[in-house]
Amino acid sequence: MNTRYETVGKKKISEIIELLSKLDAKELMAYWIDQEIKEAEMYHYLHELSKEVQWDERIPKLFFRLYQESLGHAEALLKMFKEMFPDEKPPKVDLPALEVELSKEELKELVKSKRLKDILEYLMGTEKLAHDVYRYLAEKSSDEDAKATLIWLAKIEDGHYRLLRDLYITLFGMPPE
């Protein structure tokens, strides 16, 4: 796959993890909420774009499902935030995303050029990366509530990875390299 679409390198991941580990509970929750919203927006955009090309009907359905789930996760995290911090709004956290975010133009170009393998491989990479980072942070956390939330997020990301991988195998007859 073209390295332009791969997830961030190990050095960058380490830097992001270091920054995340310095956030307090409010900031971490705000960051996670924002990440789930961005993920939902990306999957919604992919859903809309994928309807414009002649792909297997399972593709736009999966993108729509992942959009709905990501949005639901953001809502669940926001609810948790409000329970943990009544009368407060999530603070703005200015940290990079765990994965490289493709612009709408890049996503559109990938869809228009019908590079479904590249899209699915990229998405699997981002979901796997998020899973691994959440698991790592959970192992390092001494706060039981934060640990439980991180484990929950890791399971969500793993579920998304498995859905994408299963579709990849169904469509291409083999797992990704």
Image (cartoon, rainbow, N blue to C red):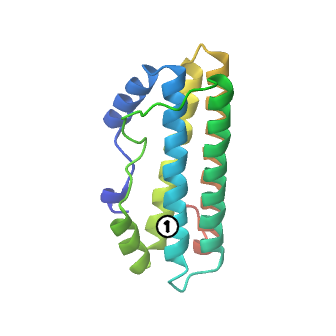
User: 67 or 124, which is in the foreground?
Assistant: 67
Q: Picture quarter containing residue 138?
A: top right
When the figure is inspected, residue 47 is found, relative to residue 25, above or below; the finding is below
Circle 1: is it few (<14), some (14-19), or many (20+) Cα within 10 Å?
some
When the figure is inspected, residue 49 is found, relative to residue 75, above or below; the finding is below
User: 123 or 65, which is in the foreground?
Assistant: 65
Q: Position of residue 56 (x, y in %)?
A: 61, 80
Q: How many marks?
A: 1
Q: Position of 19 compared to 29: left or right?
A: left
User: 91 or 126, which is in the foreground?
Assistant: 91
Outermost front residue: 87
When the figure is inspected, residue 103 is found, relative to residue 95, above or below; the finding is below
Q: Residue at x 51, y 28 (%)?
A: 28
Q: Picture quarter containing residue 122?
A: bottom left
When the figure is inspected, residue 156 is found, relative to residue 170, above or below; the finding is above
Amino acid type at image mark 1 = Tyr
Q: Position of 85 compared to 124: left or right?
A: right
Could one spot residue 158 in this view of the protein? yes
Q: Position of residue 127 (x, y in %)?
A: 54, 49
Where, quadrant-wise, is the N terminus in this rendering?
bottom left
Q: Residue at x 67, y 21 (%)?
A: 145
User: 90 or 163, which is in the foreground?
Assistant: 90
Report helix, strand or loop for mark 1: helix
Q: Position of residue 93 (x, y in %)?
A: 41, 33
Outermost bottom residue: 54
Q: Residue at x 38, y 35 (%)?
A: 13
Q: Residue at x 42, y 34 (%)?
A: 92
Q: Position of residue 103 (x, y in %)?
A: 35, 61
Could one spot residue 177 in this view of the protein? no
Which residue corresponds to mark 1?
A: 45
Q: Position of 38 compared to 59: left or right?
A: left
